[in-house]
Image (cartoon, rainbow, N blue to C red):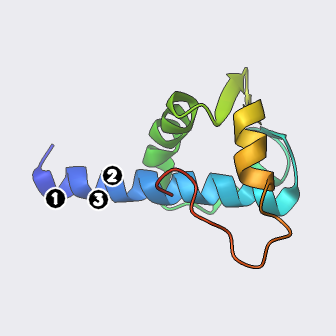
């Protein structure tokens, strides 16, 4: 994999991480299905690069302790719920762990 492609993939992974966190916040849902429902519909609209970055983005969120996998679903951990939903009423939200 070339350096430029690695950088594109890293950028796409960060974009998808932010998108997933935003999706949890928007839908106020602690658990989302990858195969049915609004997240599945949303992911269908991803371009090829973002689709390739989806699993690495989820892996990164798991590593950061924000989500965990439950079969075909991803669920916010207790830490994830605090970070995603803690500032939902604030006018300005601080960034989430580098997001």
Q: Quadrant of residue 77?
A: top right
Residue on which the image places disc 2: 10
Q: Residues within 10 Å of mark 2 (few under 14, many from 20)?
A: some
Distance of label 1 from label 2 (alpha carbons): 10 Å
Residue at 52% across / 44% down in the picture?
Answer: 54
* Residue 47 in view in this figure: yes
Nearer-N-terminus badge (1/2): 1
Left or right: 24 as drawn, with respect to 65: right
Residue at 86% across / 69% down in the picture?
Answer: 89
Residue at 73% across / 27% down in the picture?
Answer: 72
Residue on which the image places disc 3: 8
Select label 1 or label 2 by which is in front.
Answer: 2
Distance of label 1 from label 3 (alpha carbons): 6 Å
Picture coordinates of residue 61 (x, y %)?
55, 38
Residue at 43% across / 51% down in the picture?
Answer: 13
* Residue 76 in view in this figure: no
Picture coordinates of residue 52 (x, y %)?
44, 45
Q: Are marks 1 and 3 in contact (CB under 8 Å)?
A: yes
Q: Quadrant of residue 48?
A: bottom left
Distance of label 3 from label 2 (alpha carbons): 5 Å
Q: Are marks 3 and 2 in contact (CB under 8 Å)?
A: yes
Instruction: Name the residue at the top extreme.
Output: 71
Residue on which the image places disc 1: 4
Q: Quadrant of the N terminus?
A: top left
Q: Is residue 82 above or below residue 74?
A: below
Mark 2 secondary-structure assignment: helix
Left or right: 45 as drawn, with respect to 39: left
Q: Quadrant of residue 93?
A: bottom right
Q: Residues within 10 Å of mark 1 (few under 14, many from 20)?
A: few
Mark 1 secondary-structure assignment: helix
Q: Is residue 13 above or below residue 56?
A: below
Q: Nearer the viewer, residue 95 or 40?
A: 95
């Amino acid at each position: 994999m070339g350096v430029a492609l690695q950088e594109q993939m890293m950028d796409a992974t960060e974009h998808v991480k932010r998108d997933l966190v935003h999706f949890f916040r928007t839908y106020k849902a602690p658990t989302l299905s990858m195969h049915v429902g609004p997240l599945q519909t949303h992911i269908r609209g991803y371009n090829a690069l973002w689709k390739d970055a989806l699993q690495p983005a989820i892996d990164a969120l798991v590593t950061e302790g924000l989500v965990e996998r439950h079969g075909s679903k991803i669920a916010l951990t207790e830490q994830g719920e605090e970070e995603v939903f803690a500032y939902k009423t604030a006018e300005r939200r601080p960034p989430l762990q580098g997001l």
